[in-house]
Image: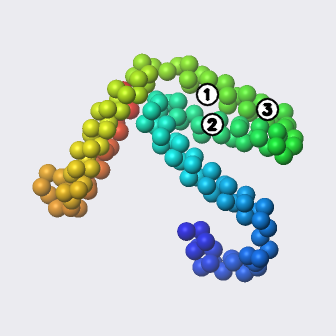
């Protein structure tokens, strides 16, 4: 999408594909595969197996891991403010994890109900509608049911 927009805005002028080094291409490929595909697959896999509160902490910890890897691998300098930020992030994540409630403790109890609800929604989508209405009305009702399901799961 961004490449198309760049081309429409004529921002591709000085780019020479032959000037791209193997190291630069390898870095781009690694970020594309590991930073997007593998990470998203791991995230969705975790969402099905552990409490959402635990999975959500990845967004806070990722920058800290990136800073530490930059320091360890690339020899980047760690400023005091960065270290203080890392300590605050890690402390906050620990605080979130220590204040877990009993509703989030067992992912299988809420997950089973959620999977059953999603199965029935998928079945309704296959028929193109819900409650015998047109396909457009069916999509609206499915959205309403998804919102209701999300609200019920939040309350657990």
| In the depicted structure, whether residue 98 falls above or below residue 146 | above
Q: Which residue is mark 1?
A: 93
The disc, 1 or 2, on the residue closer to the chain's N-terminal end is 2
At which x and y percent is residue 47?
A: 46, 37
- On screen, residue 31 versus residue 127, left or right, reads right
Q: Are marks 1 and 2 in contact (CB under 8 Å)?
A: yes
Label 1 crowd bin: few (<14), some (14–19), many (20+), radius 10 Å: some
Q: To which quarter of the image does residue 102 belong?
A: top left
Q: Residue at x 65, y 40 (%)?
A: 62
**Alpha carbon separation for disc pair 3 and 1:** 15 Å
The answer to whether residue 137 is visible is no
Which residue does the numbered mark 2 point to in the structure image? 60
Closer to the chain start, of discs 3 and 1, is: 3
Q: Compared to 94, does 76 lie above or below? A: below
Please provide percent x and percent y for residue 145.
26, 44
16, above or below 63, in the image = below
Along the horizontal axis of the image, is 98 left or right of 50?
Answer: right
Quadrant into which the C terminus falls:
top left
Q: Quadrant of the N terminus?
A: bottom right
């Amino acid at each position: 999408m961004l490449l198309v927009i760049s081309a429409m805005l004529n921002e591709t002028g000085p780019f020479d594909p032959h000037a791209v080094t193997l190291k630069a291409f390898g870095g781009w490929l690694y970020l594309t595969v590991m930073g997007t595909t593998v990470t998203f697959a791991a995230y969705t896999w975790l969402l099905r197996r552990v409490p959402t509160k635990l999975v959500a902490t990845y967004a806070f910890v990722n920058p800290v891991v990136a800073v530490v890897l930059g320091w360890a691998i690339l020899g980047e300098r760690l400023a005091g403010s960065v270290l203080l930020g890392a300590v605050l992030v890690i402390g906050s994540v620990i605080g979130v994890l220590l204040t877990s409630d009993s509703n989030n403790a067992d992912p299988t109890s809420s997950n089973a109900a959620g999977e059953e609800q999603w199965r029935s929604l998928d079945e309704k989508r296959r028929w193109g509608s819900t409650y015998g209405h047109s396909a457009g009305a069916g999509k609206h009702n499915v959205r309403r049911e998804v919102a209701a399901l999300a609200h019920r799961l939040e309350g657990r």
